[in-house]
Structures are given as structure tokens and as C-alpha cells.
């Protein structure tokens, strides 16, 4: 997994490339915990994400809960396989997917 | 039928998924089905690695069997840890808001949703969980 961070003032985009699984989710969680100070808009770009497991969902939920206290979070470029996982777990209602 | 005996630790997840994917190669299943199986394998194996022998570690066996007519694959996970029936746990409420959501608890639910059948038994000190996917 690679995380490409783009910071524009109070807006942070995290473009995630590869897999968000048991092995890689802790790295994403660390980036989220370290990078959200002063951020009002967090964009999670999943265009290059090919796989997500419950460990990844857990991390997105942590990010969403944090952003609920300080701004907004959107998830973009979700492919149909990932969307199915978001749908069955109800994450399609929790996340703002555009 | 192929079997892999391996220490049930998270670091071995890649070896387990590689082993399963190798067995799936000959079936010509779609990328989507392969991903669903990989997801289920990750969730089950990580569960065993996290809880079966906690706080120690122990062995697990992963068995992959493709039906002779190629219509389905059965993957069986065997461990000798504490008796644990993942199917006995109630499904999480997937309709509640982010604030009220518990962090975690979705793993086995994802297995149920992505597989066509899932069976558990406890026999002679072993947890035996079999997941089945139509190909």
C-alpha cells in the first residue's frame, strides 16, 4: 500500500494505492492520527485501491469519527467491488461517497 | 486437496492467501470471486491468529478443496485453541450511525456475506471452520 498525501491548507487528500488489509491498515491509521490536526476537509481517494478488509473498514470508521468532530470527510473513486463491501456493511450510509 | 500447516500469527497471512490463490489458479474463477475468497480467508485466519491461542500462539491447518466438477471451492481452517464458534455471534447492526458504531466486529459478517456456505464444528479439541464458495 502507498499513501499519497496532498495538503491544501485545511484540506487533506489521501490517495491510497494497493490494499488496505490487516497488514497495511495500521500504517493508514497512523497517517490519519498524525495528519488531521487543523484539517476541515479530508478526502480519501480510493481510485487505486484494489482491496479492503474489515481492518481497512475499521480504519475508515476511525477517520470518519474523527472528522465528524472537526469537519467533513468524503470518499471518492470507489470501484464496484469496494462499493459492494461498503454496501453490505452499511458503510455506504456512514461514509459520504461521491 | 491441498493442505498448509502454519503457525497462526498475523505475519503469516500473506503465505496463507498466496497458498489459497495458488489453488484457485486452476479453477479459472473471476477476479471478483478470487477477491471475495481472499477477503474471507483474511478475516478467518486473522481471527484465529488473534484469539485462538491468545496470549500464546499455536498451529493452524488450512485445507483447500475444489469440487471435482469445479463448481465450488471449500476452504477449511483447523486450530486447537479455545472453542470458538464464530457463527454463534449475532450479526452487527449495519444500519446505525458512525458515532454509535463499534470499531471492529465486521470480519465474520463479511465472511458470511461473501461466501455461499459456512460451517463450524468442534471435534476432539479442534475448531473446524469450513467456508464454501460457488465458482
Image (spheres, rainbow, N blue to C red):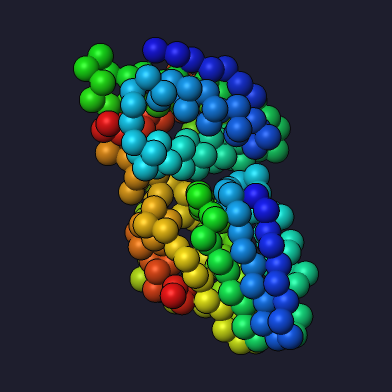
To which quarter of the image does residue A6 belong? Answer: bottom right
Say above or below: B118 vs B64.
Answer: below
| x, y percent for residue A7 | 72, 76
Name the residue at 27% across, 38% down.
B116
Instruction: Tell me the quarter of the image containing the C terminus of chain A.
Output: bottom left
Is residue A16 visible to the viewer in this orientation of the structure? Answer: yes
| x, y percent for residue B39 | 46, 42
| x, y percent for residue A77 | 47, 66
Left or right of B6 on screen, residue B130? left
| x, y percent for residue A61 | 55, 67
Say above or below: B10 vs B16.
Answer: below
Name the residue at 59% across, 74% down.
A43
Name the residue at 50% across, 49% down.
A51
Say above or below: A87 vs A74.
Answer: above
In this view, the residue in front, B92 or B72, is B72
Label count reads 0
Name the residue at 60% across, 54% down.
A17
Is residue B53 visible to the viewer in this orientation of the structure? Answer: no
Amino acid at each position: 500500500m502507498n499513501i499519497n498525501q496532498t495538503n491544501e491548507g485545511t484540506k487533506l487528500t489521501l490517495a491510497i494505492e494497493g490494499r488496505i488489509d490487516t497488514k497495511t491498515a495500521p500504517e493508514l491509521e497512523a497517517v490519519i492520527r498524525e495528519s488531521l490536526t487543523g484539517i476541515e476537509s479530508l478526502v480519501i481517494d480510493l481510485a487505486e485501491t484494489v482491496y479492503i478488509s474489515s481492518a481497512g473498514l475499521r480504519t475508515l470508521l476511525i477517520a470518519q469519527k474523527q472528522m465528524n468532530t472537526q469537519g467533513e470527510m468524503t470518499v471518492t473513486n470507489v470501484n464496484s467491488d469496494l462499493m459492494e463491501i461498503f454496501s453490505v456493511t452499511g458503510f455506504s450510509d456512514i461514509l459520504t461517497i461521491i | 486437496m491441498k493442505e498448509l500447516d502454519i503457525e497462526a500469527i498475523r505475519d503469516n497471512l500473506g503465505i496463507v492467501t498466496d497458498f489459497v490463490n495458488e489453488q484457485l489458479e486452476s479453477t479459472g474463477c473471476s477476479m471478483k470471486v478470487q477477491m471475495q475468497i481472499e477477503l474471507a480467508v483474511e478475516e478467518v485466519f486473522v481471527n484465529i491468529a488473534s484469539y485462538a491461542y491468545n496470549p500464546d500462539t499455536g498451529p493452524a491447518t488450512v485445507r483447500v478443496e475444489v469440487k471435482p466438477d469445479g463448481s465450488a471451492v471449500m476452504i477449511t481452517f483447523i486450530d486447537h485453541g479455545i472453542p470458538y464458534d464464530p457463527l454463534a455471534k449475532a450479526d452487527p447492526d449495519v444500519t446505525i450511525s458512525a458515532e454509535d458504531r463499534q470499531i471492529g466486529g465486521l470480519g465474520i459478517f463479511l465472511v458470511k456475506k461473501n461466501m455461499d456456505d459456512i460451517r463450524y464444528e468442534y471435534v476432539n479439541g479442534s475448531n473446524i471452520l469450513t467456508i464454501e464458495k460457488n465458482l
